[in-house]
Every structure is written in structure tokens, then in C-alpha cells.
Image: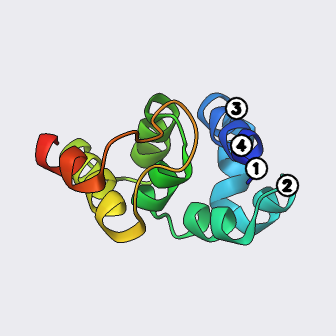
């Protein structure tokens, strides 16, 4: 998994207005500039916030991407919960789950 590349893209997208403009015009072209897996690329381009979360994207970076995509805060939070239900526990990064999915969802 190329979590670093995915996180780097989202971080740069959060900070670079020229990259934001390019992404709005040709998101596939921007994604081509990063070494992403097929799953990461698909999640980014859909955008599938839940899957991006499960893949390990930091919530601080992810919330800015969600806002960029026009996703409201409460919907962003629900999409992360739904991502865990649909795709299983967070796989990597600082949010990698150490308890069962059912325990995490019940506490969410």
C-alpha cells in the first residue's frame, strides 16, 4: 500500500491552490502523478471517504479533502463509520484498529 503517496497527494491538495484547480479540471491526471494503488486511486476519485479512512488516511488531512469535495461535517463522520462497516477495520496509519470492528462501531 502506498499510504504515504496518498496522504502526500491529499496534503498537497489541501495547501496548493494551483493543484486544487488542476484536480478540479483533471483529477485523473493529478492522481497519475502519485504512486497509488488501484484501490487508492478509485477511492480518491469517487470520492469514497470511508474507504480512504479505512486505507489509513489521517483524519486531519481527510476532513479537508471531504470539505473540498463538498461533503458536510456530519456526513463526513458518517462516511468514516460506514467505511469501517463496508471495508473492515482501518488497515494502516495512526488509526489502525486494534479492537474488533463491532467494538469500534459501538463506540462511534
Q: Name the residue tied to disc 3.
A: 16
Between the C-alphas of marks 1 and 2, the distance is: 7 Å
Q: In which quarter of the image is residue 42?
A: bottom right
Q: Residues within 10 Å of mark 1 (few under 14, many from 20)?
A: few
Between the C-alphas of marks 1 and 4, the distance is: 11 Å
Which type of secondary structure does the marked residue at label 3 adopt?
loop
In the displayed structure image, the side of residue 46 where residue 100 appears, left or right: left
- Judge whether 100 appears above or below 27 on screen: above
Between the C-alphas of marks 3 and 2, the distance is: 19 Å
Q: Name the residue tied to disc 2.
A: 35
Q: How crowded is mark 2: few (under 14 residues within 10 Å), some or many (20 or more)?
A: some
- Judge whether 48 appears above or below 73 on screen: below
- Judge whether 81 appears above or below 59 on screen: below
User: Mark 3, mark 4: which one is toward the viewer?
Assistant: 4
Contact? badges 1 and 2 (CB < 8 Å) = yes
Decide which of tag 4 and tag 2 comes sooner along the chain.
4
Which type of secondary structure does the marked residue at label 4 adopt?
helix
Between the C-alphas of marks 4 and 2, the distance is: 10 Å
Residue drawn at point x = 53 percent, y = 50 percent: 91
The residue closer to the viewer here, 74 or 107, is 107
In the displayed structure image, the side of residue 91 where residue 78 appears, left or right: left
Decide which of tag 1 and tag 4 comes sooner along the chain.
1
In the displayed structure image, the side of residue 37 where residue 100 appears, left or right: left
| Mark number displayed over residue 21 | none
Decide which of tag 3 and tag 4 comes sooner along the chain.
4
Q: Name the residue tied to disc 1.
A: 2
Would you say residue 96 is visible in this rendering?
yes
Between the C-alphas of marks 3 and 1, the distance is: 21 Å
User: Mark 3, mark 2: which one is toward the viewer?
Assistant: 2
Q: How many marks?
A: 4
- Judge whether 81 appears above or below 57 on screen: below
Amino acid at each position: 500500500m502506498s499510504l504515504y503517496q496518498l496522504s502526500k497527494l491529499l496534503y498537497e491538495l489541501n495547501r496548493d491552490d494551483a493543484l486544487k484547480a488542476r484536480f478540479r479540471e483533471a483529477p485523473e491526471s493529478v492522481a497519475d502523478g502519485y504512486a497509488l494503488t488501484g484501490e487508492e486511486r478509485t477511492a480518491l476519485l469517487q470520492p469514497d471517504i470511508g474507504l480512504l479512512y479505512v486505507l489509513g488516511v489521517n483524519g486531519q488531512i481527510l476532513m479537508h479533502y471531504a470539505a473540498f469535495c463538498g461533503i458536510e461535517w456530519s456526513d463526513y463522520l458518517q462516511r468514516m463509520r460506514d467505511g469501517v462497516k463496508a471495508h473492515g477495520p482501518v488497515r494502516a496509519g495512526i488509526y489502525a484498529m486494534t479492537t474488533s470492528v463491532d467494538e469500534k462501531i459501538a463506540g462511534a
